[in-house]
Amino acid sequence: MTSAPRPVFDSPAGGAEFEPVASVADLTEGTILQRVRPSGDAVCLVRYKGEISALSDICTHQHFSMSLGDLLEDGTLQCAWHGARYDCRSGEVKQVPAAAPLPVFQVRLEGDTILVGPRCERIDGKYEASTVRVP
């Protein structure tokens, strides 16, 4: 049995795979949305102040889905289970009990389609932020 080929998008730097995960219309301002990439990664899409970011949907504290939590007014994602908080762009821990940041994924738009690529690099314990502005 064969499956239909899925679209593959190369990053501007070349080589890295980007996968379509949602439409801009699926993610309204000030909301979060879970998507599971065809590669199997669960991502939490965030639309905050006109920008979209993609982080791991799994809380680093106790493996709870971040998309079930809240996006606070200051751009902080709060886990619904134990209240760990993370910056919605960089994944940086803003409040314990979490000790490790949320992994951040590269994100971009093609038309109205949100594409998520590989994890951003982690340098000195922090992930590079990756956001895309919604036109």
Image (cartoon, rainbow, N blue to C red):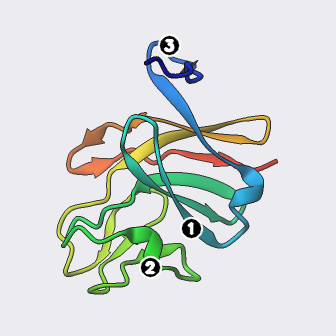
Is residue 126 toward the left or the right of residue 71 in the image? left
Q: What residue is shown with label 3?
A: 14
Q: What residue is shown with label 1?
A: 32
Q: Secondary structure at mark 3?
A: loop
Provide residue 24's location: percent of width, then percent of height: 74, 51
Residue 121 appears in the picture as rendered: yes
Mark sitting on residue 104:
none
Q: Nearer the viewer, mark 1 or mark 3?
A: 1
Tell me whether circle 1 and circle 2 mark residues in contact (CB < 8 Å): yes
| Type of amino acid under label 2 | Gly
Q: Residue at coordinates 51% horizontally, 17% vertically from top-left?
A: 13
Mark sitting on residue 69:
2
Q: Residue at coordinates 48% horizontally, 58% vertically from top-left?
A: 89
Q: Residue at coordinates 66% horizontally, 56% vertically from top-left?
A: 51
Towards the viewer: 21 or 56: 21
Q: Residue at coordinates 53% horizontally, 82% vertically from top-left?
A: 72
Question: Within 10 angstroms of label 3, few (less than 14), some, or many (20 or more) residues?
Answer: few
Please report whichever mark, 1 or 3, sits nearer to the chain's N-terminal start: 3
Q: Tell me: residue 106, above or below residue 57.
A: above
Towards the viewer: 87 or 68: 68
Provide residue 111's location: percent of width, then percent of height: 79, 35
* Residue 39 position by quadrant: top left
Q: Tell me: residue 95, above or below residue 2.
A: below
Provide residue 16's location: percent of width, then percent of height: 44, 20
Q: Secondary structure at mark 1?
A: strand
Residue 8 appears in the picture as rendered: no
